[in-house]
Every structure is written in structure tokens, then in C-alpha cells.
Amino acid sequence: MRVNFLQYVGPAHNYRNSYVAQAAIREAGYEIALGMMPKSLGPLTFIFTGTGNVSSVSRSALCSSTAFVSYPLYL
């Protein structure tokens, strides 16, 4: 039985700092890249609004994985 990699990425307040959260997201990204994403899940879409600390750290954490970034200007 496959384990859902998203079970290992928790809410932001569960991590000591942003580096630990980025490592969890990066590990999930590696599992996606290895083809371990459950077939029941389609493409994942994340939308960030604002330019504050939460948005910028979240964006940098996601970009450290195997994510494709598309800016609104290009949509």
C-alpha cells in the first residue's frame, strides 16, 4: 500500500522554522518526481495572495520543490 506523501506536510505552526517546513515540502516534491503521487490525485494547484511574510515564505518553500510557477501575467 502506498503512503500519501501529503500526510507528511503539516500546518505551518507544526514546524520549528521555515527551513524545516521547506525540507518537508522538498521531500514531498521528490516523491512526486519519483512517480509516487497517488493516481487519485490530479495536478495540485496552489494560489498565493498578498506579498507579506507568510505568502513569501510559502512561495519560496514551494519553489524549492519540483513545482512549476505560473504568474498571473502569463495566464
Image (cartoon, rainbow, N blue to C red):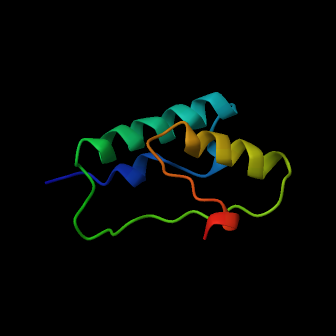
Q: Nearer the viewer, residue 7 or 34?
A: 34
Query: Is there any visible trace of residue 13 in the rendered image?
Result: no
Taking 50 as reference, is 57 above or below it? above
For this orientation, the residue located farthest to the left is 1
Taking 19 as reference, is 45 above or below it? below
Q: Position of residue 57 (x, y in %)?
A: 72, 42
Which of the 4 image quarters holds residue 62?
Answer: top right
Looking at the image, residue 73 sits to the left or right of residue 27; the answer is right
Q: Nearer the viewer, residue 42 or 5?
A: 42
At x 48% / y 39%, what residue is drawn?
65
At x 82% / y 60%, what residue is drawn?
50
At x 13% / y 54%, what residue is drawn?
1
Q: Position of residue 15 (x, y in %)?
A: 63, 37
Which of the 4 image quarters holds residue 66?
Answer: top left
Looking at the image, residue 25 sits to the left or right of residue 6; the answer is right
Q: Position of residue 36 (x, y in %)?
A: 23, 49
Q: Nearer the viewer, residue 15 or 37?
A: 37
At x 31% / y 54%, what residue is drawn?
4
Q: Position of residue 6 (x, y in %)?
A: 41, 53
Dividing the image into 4 quarters, which one contains the C terminus?
bottom right
For this orientation, the residue located farthest to the right is 52
